[in-house]
Amino acid sequence: MLRGGEPDPRLQGTTTDARLLDRRGPTDWVHTDPWRVLRIQSEFVEGFGLLAELPKAVSVFGSARTPQDSPHYAAGVAIGAALADAGYAVITGGGPGAMEAANRGASEAGGLSVGLGIELPFEQELNEWVDVGIAFRYFFVRKTMFVKYAQAFVILPGGFGTLDELFEALTLVQTRKVTRFPVVLFGSEYWSGLVDWLRTTMVPAATIKDTDLDLFTVTDDVDEVVRIVQEAEKARQAGDNGGGMRAFPVDDDPSDA
């Protein structure tokens, strides 16, 4: 209740319901921050409701700009198919390029193909290979869905958006905001420069620890991707919250994130 001042005489003799039903006026209020909170809430509710019964799944990220004749596209199709054959649903951002490739591979292999789209200034519809899809207004709601419903992340070559998802995942794992689970970078040639920079610049500068490099694996082998995911699942079922990753000692020091 907000106090102060006398009641508006124009409202005397009316009820809240009547004012709600009768009022016609400016619509600016629907764009205010309190109303946005309700929209954000509705996106969480819609996402949780749609994905609550999703089977075990892996999120696959990559560039929307990857052309269909690219080896990175072929790798996405192969990874999506291999994960589907292993019994995992495949979650992507639902767009074109590498995302389409992973969705296509999963769909063609008879698996469940999920697309979590995002509203952008330029048109980007969910690709045709998505079986279960939803479009979000807010990146942070979408990111929550990627993390909450995946058992692992596979990162194909991509741009700023892909790097955003990569480092978001690594930060959550490093700070133990989520149970540690595999983060796999696919395409050693593409990722080698970044990994070298982490090793030769960030570690010596003490902005990350050398053990943080164990938070991810780099590979060019589709079978290894599936093996890493499966081993992590077995480890979690055995009570190992390390998720079957390489040796990662418990560190109680403050996070370097």
Image: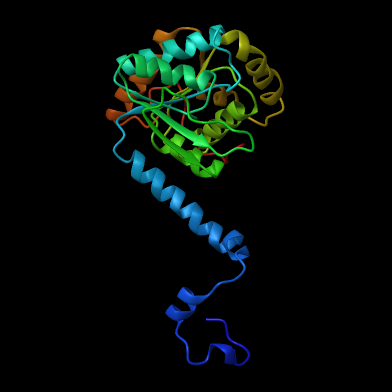
User: Could you say which is closer to the camera, residue 156 or residue 19?
Assistant: 19
Q: Position of residue 206 (x, y in %)?
A: 68, 30
Colour pattern: rainbow
Is residue 202 positioned above or below 80 on the image?
below
Q: Quadrant of residue 53?
A: top left
Whether residue 133 is visible? yes
Q: Position of residue 41 (x, y in %)?
A: 46, 54
Q: How many marks?
A: 0
Is residue 85 positioned above or below 117 on the image?
above
Location of the C terminus by quadrant is top right
Q: Residue at x 49, y 8 (%)?
A: 74
Is residue 9 positioned above or below 41 on the image?
below
Q: Position of residue 136 (x, y in %)?
A: 50, 42
Q: Quadrant of residue 113?
A: top left
Lateral position of residue 9 relative to residue 241, left or right = right
User: Could you say which is closer to the camera, residue 117 or residue 91?
Assistant: 117
Whether residue 155 is visible? no
User: Could you say which is closer to the camera, residue 210 or residue 135?
Assistant: 135
Q: Position of residue 121 (x, y in %)?
A: 64, 38
Q: Residue at x 52, y 38 (%)?
A: 175
